Image: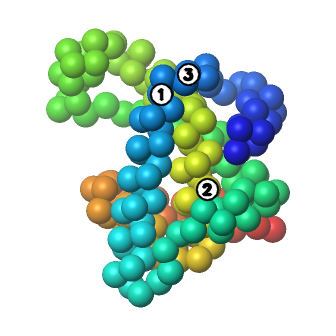
Amino acid sequence: MKELWQTIQQELPQLHFYKENDSWEEARIDYLENYISECNTLLCKCNFQEISIKDLYTYLSLYSFEVFCKQDLLETENTEIIIDESEQDYILQELGMSEDEYKQRCKTHDYLEVANHLVDYYLLTEHSDILLEYYKLQGYEEPEQMLKDKMNLYSMCKR
């Protein structure tokens, strides 16, 4: 996965990337384990097989997955970040950032994103309806549109 991450950084120099920071490693692992666990819970409810690390490694080596990753990162870069009034106090006071700093941070990419995209790609390939349920569980606005956008990107990358 680190090789792919390094390739992405080299091939997409216009994006902003966090410098590698080992102190974040535990938080990254916890986040990823939580994401996979929540997806596995949804898969089990539908009597589907849980996500296996072996399956994820298989997808990691696919060129279409690499393209999917790169395109998703590029789309994130081009997405306008809109901050609700309800979020302003949290950003300014709790995070101690200006709105511009926060927006820049949202567009700075981390190694963990490759792992997230890997799980997304697996679910899009095997059980896209589970990804929709996950989006709903997370309380995302317009989860159906999010899935549609991911499916369109996925379809484009599979060609």
Position of 126 with respect to 85 (left or right) is right
Q: Which residue is mark 2?
A: 118
Q: Secondary structure at mark 3?
A: loop
User: Where residue 159 appears, x then y in whole percent?
Assistant: 81, 68
Q: Residue at x 77, y 39 (%)?
A: 3
> The N terminus appears in which quarter of the rendering?
top right
Q: Are marks 2 and 1 in contact (CB under 8 Å)?
A: no
Q: Which residue is mark 1?
A: 24
Residue 144 visible to the viewer:
no
Q: Which residue is mark 3?
A: 21
Quarter occupied by residue 58: bottom right
Mark 3 crowdedness (10 Å alpha carbons): few <14, some 14-19, many ≥20: few
Give the residue type that dot 1 points to: Trp
User: Where residue 122 appears, x then y in whole percent?
Assistant: 60, 66
Q: Residue at x 47, y 38 (%)?
A: 28
Q: Are marks 3 and 1 in contact (CB under 8 Å)?
A: yes
Label located before the other in sequence (2 or 1): 1
